[in-house]
Amino acid sequence: MHTVTLQPSGHQFQVEDAESVLAAALRQGFVLPYGCRDGACGSCKSRIVSGAVDYGVYQAKTLTEEEKAQGKALLCQAKPLSDLVLEARAIGAAKDIQVKKLPCRVQKMERLSGDAMRLQLKLPANEKLVYLAGQYVEFLLKDGSRRSFSMANPPHDAELIELHVRHVPGGRFTDHVFGKMKERDILRCEGPLGTFFLREDSDKPIVFVASGTGFAPIKAVIEHMFHKDFARPATLYWGGRRPADLYMHALAERWAAEHPGFRYVPVISDALPEDAWRGRTGFVHRAVMEDFPDLSGHQVYACGVPVMVDAARRDFTALCGLPEDEFYADSFTTQADTAPPDAAPAAAPQADSPR
């Protein structure tokens, strides 16, 4: 057993042999930043001030050799080899929220676009899921695997849990959702999970960046802001390949019309002539950089595919002056992203996107 000390708080907790730092922290009520818990998204990356770790299994692009040389590690994978001092902030907002395993019933299914489905789930009558806007749940499948989906509705409007599911052809779970799932089916889930949620102790202007169904948790956060009447200026950049990928475009436009401090910028990367698209084009994070060459006084919340989240993190901090600790992200990793680097490719039925 080893002792981990967090800086700057000075909090300490114990880690059992062969236990990851993150697992031990969560077990003892210390919520550290995390996302996928599989060494793929990088949300839990922290700096080791002193001590040694077994780095575990992770993706090389998520933790580079240069970052390891700088003392960084992924806390979801790192196992202490000695007592540790870590530069990591415990997140008090999520500390007292109970993670539950619950059955849920598919109350309603609605096709939002060709490859996006809105699921609305009903919990048992005596149960309520308490969560922070932006968090996610995991479906527990019969074979022991899990699939993660972010809540798209804010906590104040949680009579039904709303999820946005993107279809990945060949994906075991999403093929089932788009093929065989029907209303009144029973699923089993665990949640809430994750540390992607609004930091309410700041008054900085916000830039939201979403790709595809990365819109779901950002929708929950934005609707939570409106419900709480937060006065912080906010801009949403939502990117897709084709206009149809922005499956709630009209809702985002309505937000912008009804809330003076809120702007919406849709961005399309691969519009075809028949789309008659007249809006912004290119990569969504590049559109942000064009409009905000100086992000030093902002917070950024980015959600979607790893390539977008990684590029935004890199370019916003290196080129636009965004402080590293003001970039909050939920990277929608796939099974391929979470596989060990030397593993054989997953068979098609396993290849779901988690969102």
Image (cartoon, grey):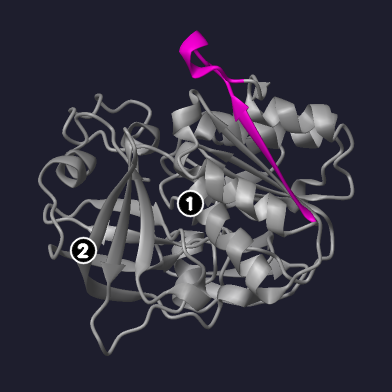
- Answer left or right for 105 relative to 142: right
Is 24 left or right of 174, judged from the image as shown? right
Depth check, front residue: 223 or 58 = 223
Q: Is 205 rendered above or below residue 193?
A: above
Residue 266 belongs to magenta span:
yes
Q: Position of residue 351 (x, y in %)?
A: 25, 33
Residue 216 image label: 1
Q: What is the C-alpha distance between the residues marked 2 and 1?
A: 18 Å
Classify residue 349 by image quadrant: top left
Note whether residue 256 is visible: yes
The one of 229 and 320 positioned closer to us in this rendering: 229
The segment highlighted magenta reads 261-277
Q: Position of residue 206 (x, y in %)?
A: 76, 52
The question of residue 259 being in magenta is answered with no
Q: How dense is the environment of label 2, judged by Cα within 10 Å: few (below 14), some, or many (20 and up)? A: some
Whether residue 5 appears in this view of the structure is no
Foreground: 123 or 338? 123
**Residue at image x 67%, y 67%?**
225
**Residue 65, disc:** none
Q: What percent of the width, then of the height, locates residue 123?
A: 27, 76
> Residue at left 47%, top 69%?
24
Give the labeled residue for mark 2: 106
